Image (tube, grey):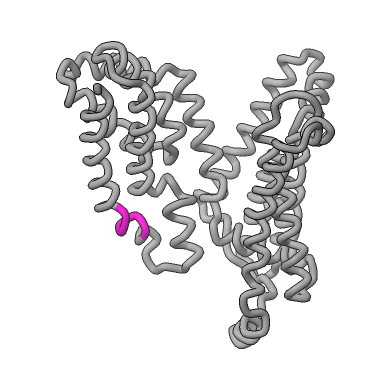
Amino acid sequence: MFQQQYLMWLAGAILLIVAVLSWRDSANPRRFTTGLFWALYGVIFLIGDGAYQLMAQWAGDAEVGRRALHIAVGVAVVLMALIAGCGGVRLGRYHQRSDEQKQESAKRLGNKLFLPALAIPVVTVIGVLAFNHIPGLQDSVFGPGNHATLVTLFSMMVGCILGWLIALKITHEKPVQSMQETRRLLDAVGWAFILPQILATLGLLFTTAGVGTAISHLTEQYLAVDNRLIAVAVYAVGMALLTMVMGNAFAAFPIVTAGIGIPILVLQHGGNPAVMAAIGMFSGYCGTLMTPMAANFNIVPARLLELPDRNAVIKAQVPTGVLLLLVNIFLLYFLMFL
């Protein structure tokens, strides 16, 4: 049966190939640290149940082995942060064609260039529909149970592989060049590539540490949340601000909702929790528009487009983010208590 761990192993293998290519790139002034960064990231993806069992056997206790493995992963993440913080991830040479060759190839291929990119969403949609509507197909591939997330990831993986094969066919390039392009994109994005996972982990830590309870206490002590408009504004602005800190509205949502949304807006003021959740997430998205922590939205595009100002995307989005946040406050106030 296909397991989600297989997807992790595939990602880890790709990252290890990128690491080897980086180490072999004499044009990269930081080739050792660049390769080490991607190698550590790849090893983290490769760690799975087998590693837990090996560590448990080595330590003689399952819990001790699990803790040792967690510590090892934590050390690897800290080492990656040090490499990135010291500028250890640099661009190298990727055996690309000249500008003239690229233009000639683009003219020759024309609209065929869109086929690999379009194959990914098309195959993903077809795969999800097939697994959900063909009786027995999901169980035969993944086994019994609910595999909604795995179905989507598996279908997307098939779409990516098919898109890759189509790209090789129409461009007549060798597979190794596709790995060079993978390395080029990863090196261009740099440390921002791992930021979503780090921020998701940070959100889990905040929730476990009781940050939501602390926010609730501070809000009730120092703000006039008996006033409905103030309570709504605190919730919406809190969602935006914490999202700006964490870079992810999904990570901020359980913290702010547990601290302000449920105890104050729902229980104290009798608001509709469905409306609160929907508009609360939109308020968090306003924060996403205005923070470099949402690197995959705001920093990565600037780097890939080689903009001279890496904060250009954020500066363009700030007016929209502020205006939408104000609109969300009034929508929440007028719709939540109907």
x 48%, y 56%: residue: 300
How far across and how far down the image is residue 258, in percent?
38, 19
Residue 34 in the image: above or below residue 11: below
Specify start and end residues of the magenta stretch as a single range: 313-317
Q: Quadrant of residue 285?
A: top left
Q: Does the magenta stretch include residue 26?
A: no
Which quarter of the figure has residue 70?
A: top right
Q: Against 114, is 152 above or below?
A: above
Quadrant the C terminus occupies? top left
Query: Residue at position x 82%, y 36% from top?
Result: 141
Q: Which residue is drawn at 26% across and 31% down?
A: 332
The percent position of residue 210, horizontal first and vertical second, equals: 42, 17
Residue 200 vs residue 320: left or right? Answer: right
Name the quadrant containing residue 336: top left
Q: How many labels does the image show?
A: 0
> Relative to 190, is 237 on the left or the right?
left
- Residue 331: x and y in percent read 25, 35
Q: Magenta segment, principal secondary structure?
A: helix
The answer to whether 228 is drawn above or below residue 327 in the figure is above
Residues 126 and 108: in front is 126
